């Protein structure tokens, strides 16, 4: 299982080549306050001085430190291949293949690279420095040295330096595959440890937190860390390990790490003899190695799944970017043909990408025809905007100066045309809605169906312009046809329409029934010839819609006498009277005949209006489909080819967007890295390490 850590290091190398952190690999993040001894702990694990030193904030960028154990034979082989003279060396990712055997030079390079990105004003950056150390004296580990937690800005540091550092630390330790190494000085109160506090925010159960207590030799006289190391003060599930760091004097006098580890062992044996074998730098290194191996083993199944999912996603992404164009003529024709086919398929409902969030294409057009347009027509009141006074006025205006024996047919035609005209506006609105939906189909095809067009923004814009222009040309033609459909209905009022004749016959029967009911209610003193007078009316009205407008003519004299009020006073002799000044009543009770005439006209208008509405509801969708939808479908391919398939336009239309080539290369590199990572994990299964 020891070989699992090199596997993770190999995976880290794979993803470092593409500069991506989309895969959260198992690693150990070192967290602590400034001057808590973080750097000393790391140097003790490496066994060499390699980290920058100084006062205040020194670590200003995350340092991803990979420790690689090298066997003697492997060291000789590597030395021969890389020309390395020495048993320990280091490599930075940003310096490519340059090998560092001088650890002072490594420290200088860390300082220079930190200032290059973060500047020299003590600011921080979340861009990591990658360093790999090869040595026979280290165990396989991957450590991340993070900036120390601080509270107060120093010098020209930004005022929110505390928030910046905190967010940077949380970014790394929030990774569920990360082991948190919380470093706290022994000469401080463990209950106020900032490292443990921030660790508990992301790991409340402490399942991946290991506490390190530094500076055991600097505790106040008469005190010790026994309770802390035994876990009685702050229990940590992965344990607490105490270490002794080199003092600043030791660093100044160039005391080696090896000597410091020997002195540490002697101190632990003297001060904490019962705990000496479970503390110290060497025990810390072995513990971290063991924890990391077990953690890697637990994380590998999920890691494998994540890599496979990402590989499939990047394969799809790379396919959408397409291959570099070689035959421009064939590519242009292929893209035009594919767009036209997808546009038509979206209308027909056979597109490859079916929208699930909302109706689109042909489905929305169907909804417009039968739901939006249909309901709008049904909501139009046949007698809307038409009052009884309007009907009566139309009847009177149609008779001219002579009193009418019959209600003139002109009044019916005049009124019914007025009502039929109201169907034109919703019909034209139906055309507009279908036109808008066909415009939306263009964007739908660009976004979902033909993503290749995104590679060529100029071609995309040109296709949109051609289709939009075609739709724009068909709009007035379709509107004209719909206008004509309404005009046709207005041109000839067909009172012989079978449905209309049936309605007239039904109304005749109703009126005849009402007449019979009135005859039964007549008193016996009424002369028979008066009663028989209505028989002629029946004969005159049967079979003709005008006949029923004559009902009640015999009682006209009586009705007139009832309606006439007292005569106005006679004008004084010698004074002229302007008849136009006589006030016209705004509202009055209609006579029985007027009421009957208006009711009949209204019923006829309603009956004929429903016939016309039914015709319009059927004919408008057909006209829209023929003149707009089907015409665009049939002519789209030829229109696009005729407008765009020209040799002079090839180079311009097939110019890729500026970042497309870069994105294609990045996707290809990432896919290659994921495939390589998948192979690495497959090797683990084959060697039974997992």
Image (spheres, rainbow, N blue to C red):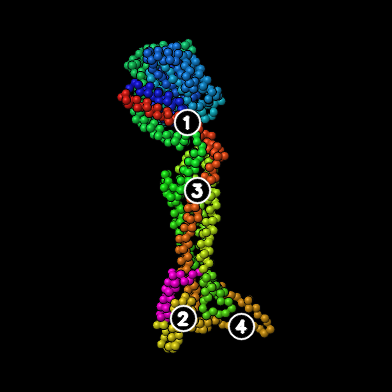
Q: Write the start and end of the magenta stretch as one range.
A: 493-518
Name the quarter where the N terminus is drawn.
top left
Q: Earlier in the sequence, mark 3 or mark 2?
A: 2
Disc 1 vs disc 3: which is toward the camera? 3
Q: Is residue 155 above or below residue 486?
A: above
Q: Earlier in the sequence, mark 1 or mark 3?
A: 3
Residue where numbered disc 1 is placed: 666
Q: Is residue 232 above or below residue 105?
A: below
Residue 559 seen in render:
yes
Q: Is residue 618 above or below residue 548?
A: above
- Calculate the distance from the C-alpha at mark 3 to the C-alpha at mark 2: 62 Å
User: What label does residue 569 carry, if any?
Assistant: 4
Residue 32 seen in render:
no
Circles 1 and 3 in contact, beta carbons < 8 Å:
no
Q: Position of residue 631 (x, y in %)?
A: 49, 52
Give the class, few, some or many, for how many residues have Cα within 10 Å of label 4's Cα (few <14, many ≥20).
few
User: What label does residue 540 carry, if any?
Assistant: 2
Q: Earlier in the sequence, mark 4 or mark 1?
A: 4
Residue drawn at the location 53% of the way across and 54% of the way down: 475
- In the displayed orientation, state which residue is furthest to the right: 574
Give the class, few, some or many, for how many residues have Cα within 10 Å of label 2's Cα (few <14, many ≥20).
some
Q: Earlier in the sequence, mark 4 or mark 3?
A: 4
Residue where numbered disc 3 is placed: 636
- Calculate the distance from the C-alpha at mark 4 to the C-alpha at mark 1: 104 Å
Q: Nearer the viewer, residue 430 or 229?
A: 430
- Calculate the distance from the C-alpha at mark 2 to the C-alpha at mark 1: 92 Å
Q: Position of residue 235 (x, y in %)?
A: 35, 26
- Calculate the distance from the C-alpha at mark 2 to the C-alpha at mark 4: 42 Å
Give the class, few, some or many, for how many residues have Cα within 10 Å of label 3's Cα (few <14, many ≥20).
many
Disc 4 vs disc 1: which is toward the camera? 1
């Amino acid at each position: 299982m020891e070989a699992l850590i090199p596997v993770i290091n190999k995976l880290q190398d794979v993803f470092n080549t593409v500069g991506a952190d989309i895969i959260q690999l198992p690693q150990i993040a070192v967290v602590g306050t400034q001057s808590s001894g973080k750097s000393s702990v790391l140097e003790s694990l490496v066994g060499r001085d390699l980290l920058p030193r100084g006062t205040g904030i020194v670590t200003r960028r995350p340092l991803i430190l990979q420790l690689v154990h090298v066997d003697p034979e492997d060291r000789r082989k590597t030395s021969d291949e890389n020309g390395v003279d020495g048993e320990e060396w280091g490599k930075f990712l940003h310096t490519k293949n340059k090998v560092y055997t001088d650890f002072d030079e490594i420290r200088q390079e860390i300082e220079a690279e930190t200032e290059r990105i973060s500047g020299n004003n003590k600011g921080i950056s979340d861009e990591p420095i990658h360093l790999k150390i090869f040595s026979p004296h280290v165990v396989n580990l991957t450590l991340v040295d993070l900036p120390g937690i601080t509270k107060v800005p120093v010098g020209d540091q930004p005022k929110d330096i505390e928030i910046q550092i905190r967010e940077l630390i949380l970014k790394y330790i929030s990774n569920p595959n990360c082991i948190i190494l919380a470093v706290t000085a022994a000469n401080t109160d463990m209950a106020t440890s900032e490292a443990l506090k921030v660790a508990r925010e992301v790991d409340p159960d402490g399942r991946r937190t290991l506490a390190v207590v530094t500076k055991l030799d600097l505790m106040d006289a008469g005190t010790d860390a026994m309770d802390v190391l035994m876990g009685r003060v702050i229990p940590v599930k992965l344990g607490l390990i105490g270490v002794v760091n080199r003092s600043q004097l030791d660093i100044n006098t160039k005391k080696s790490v090896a000597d410091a580890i020997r002195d540490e062992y002697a101190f632990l044996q003297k001060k904490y003899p019962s705990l000496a074998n479970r503390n110290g730098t060497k025990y810390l290194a072995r513990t971290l190695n063991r924890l990391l191996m077990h953690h890697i083993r637990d994380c590998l199944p999920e890691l494998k799944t994540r890599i496979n999912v990402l590989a499939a996603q990047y394969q799809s992404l790379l396919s959408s970017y397409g291959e570099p164009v070689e035959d421009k003529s064939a590519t242009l024709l292929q893209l035009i043909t594919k767009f036209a086919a997808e546009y038509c398929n979206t209308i027909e409902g056979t597109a490859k990408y079916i929208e699930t969030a909302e109706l689109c294409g042909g489905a929305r057009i169907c909804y417009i025809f039968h739901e939006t347009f249909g309901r709008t027509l049904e909501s139009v009141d046949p007698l809307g905007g038409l009052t009884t006074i309007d009907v009566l006025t139309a009847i009177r205006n149609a008779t001219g100066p002579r009193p009418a024996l019959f209600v003139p047919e002109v009044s019916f035609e005049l009124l019914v045309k007025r009502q039929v005209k109201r169907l034109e506006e919703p019909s034209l609105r139906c055309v507009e809605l279908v036109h808008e939906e066909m415009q939306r189909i263009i964007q739908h095809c660009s976004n979902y169906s033909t993503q290749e067009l995104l590679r060529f923004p100029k071609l995309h814009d040109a296709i949109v312009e051609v289709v939009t222009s075609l739709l724009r040309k068909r709009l007035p033609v379709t509107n004209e046809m719909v206008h004509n459909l309404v005009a046709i209905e207005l041109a000839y009022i067909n009172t012989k329409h079978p449905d209309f004749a049936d309605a007239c016959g039904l109304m005749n029967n109703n009126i005849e029934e009402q007449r019979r009911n009135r005859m039964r209610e007549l008193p016996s003193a009424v002369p028979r010839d008066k009663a028989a007078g209505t028989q002629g009316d029946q004969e005159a009205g049967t079979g003709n819609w005008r006949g029923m407008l004559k009902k009640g003519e015999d009682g006209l004299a009586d009705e007139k006498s009832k309606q006439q009020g007292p005569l106005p006073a006679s004008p004084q002799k010698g004074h002229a009277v302007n008849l136009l000044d006589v006030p016209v009543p705004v509202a009055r009770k209609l006579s029985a005949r007027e009421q009957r005439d208006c009711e009949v006209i209204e019923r006829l208008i309603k009956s004929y209006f429903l016939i016309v509405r039914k015709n319009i509801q059927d004919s408008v969708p057909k006209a829209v489909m023929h003149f707009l939808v089907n015409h665009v479908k049939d002519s789209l391919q030829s229109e696009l080819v005729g407008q765009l398939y020209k040799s002079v336009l090839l180079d311009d239309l097939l110019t890729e967007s500026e970042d497309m080539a870069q994105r294609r290369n990045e996707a290809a590199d990432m896919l290659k890295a994921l495939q390589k990572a998948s192979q690495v994990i497959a090797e683990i299964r084959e060697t039974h390490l997992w």
